[in-house]
């Protein structure tokens, strides 16, 4: 985890940064800001049951994309490349996945709304054009 967050640092430097960050998180509790960290016997993690993630919500809507409202909500959530500009090697695959997923849902929305001749059709067509031109 430490090496992923602080690439290019030595293992000891990355671990030192991690421990300092954990201590900072613990101090936030005094200000009623709780970061749901689980730390037991040398393992560190986040209690994901206490975390909201727009990526997780996007994924839920994507997996249920057969329903028009799920496509609409997912498209609302997508605001651009995931962690755009971050220096991590693993980001590119996530950027591509979410961009392609959003494009697929925009295409589904456009197809569905074209039949209904609603004003939203043009809106989703423009969004799809912008997304696929970048």
Image (cartoon, grey):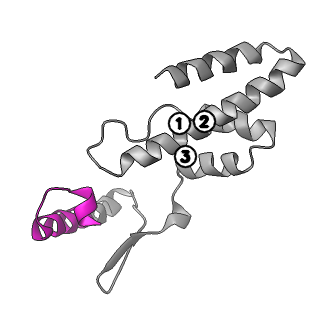
What's the residue at 57%, 38% (across, down)? 100
For this rendering, which residue is in front, 100 or 62?
Answer: 100
Nearer to us of marks 2 and 3 is 2
What's the residue at 22%, 65% (across, down)? 18
Q: CA distance from mark 3 to mark 1?
A: 14 Å
Q: Secondary structure under badge 2?
A: helix
The N terminus is located in which quarter? bottom left
Q: Which residues are magenta?
A: 1-22
Residue located beneath label 1 in the image? 99
Name the N-terminal-most of marks 2 and 3. 3
Q: Secondary structure under badge 3?
A: helix
Kindly check if marks 1 and 2 are in contact, taking CB atoms under 8 A apart as contact.
yes
For this rendering, which residue is in front, 18 or 121?
Answer: 121
Nearer to us of marks 3 and 1 is 1
Residue 54's place in the image compared with 72, above or below, is below
Q: CA distance from mark 1 to mark 2?
A: 5 Å
Q: Quadrant of residue 115?
A: top right
Q: Is residue 79 magenta?
A: no
Crowding near pointer 3: few (<14 within 10 Å), some, many (20+)? few
Residue located beneath label 3 in the image? 54
Residue 129's place in the image compared with 105, above or below, is above
Q: CA distance from mark 2 to mark 3?
A: 13 Å
């Amino acid at each position: 985890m430490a090496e992923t967050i602080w690439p290019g640092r030595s293992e000891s430097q990355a671990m030192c940064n991690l421990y300092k960050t954990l201590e900072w998180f613990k101090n936030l509790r005094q200000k009623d800001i709780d970061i749901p960290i689980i730390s037991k016997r040398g393992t560190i993690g986040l209690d994901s049951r206490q975390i909201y993630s727009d990526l997780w919500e996007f994924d839920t809507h994507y997996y249920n994309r057969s329903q028009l409202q799920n496509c609409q909500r997912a498209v609302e959530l997508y605001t651009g490349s995931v962690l755009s500009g971050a220096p991590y090697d693993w980001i590119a695959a996530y950027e591509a996945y979410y961009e392609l997923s959003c494009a697929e849902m925009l295409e589904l929305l456009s197809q569905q709304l074209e039949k209904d001749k609603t004003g939203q059709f043009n809106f989703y067509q423009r969004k799809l054009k912008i997304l696929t031109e970048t």
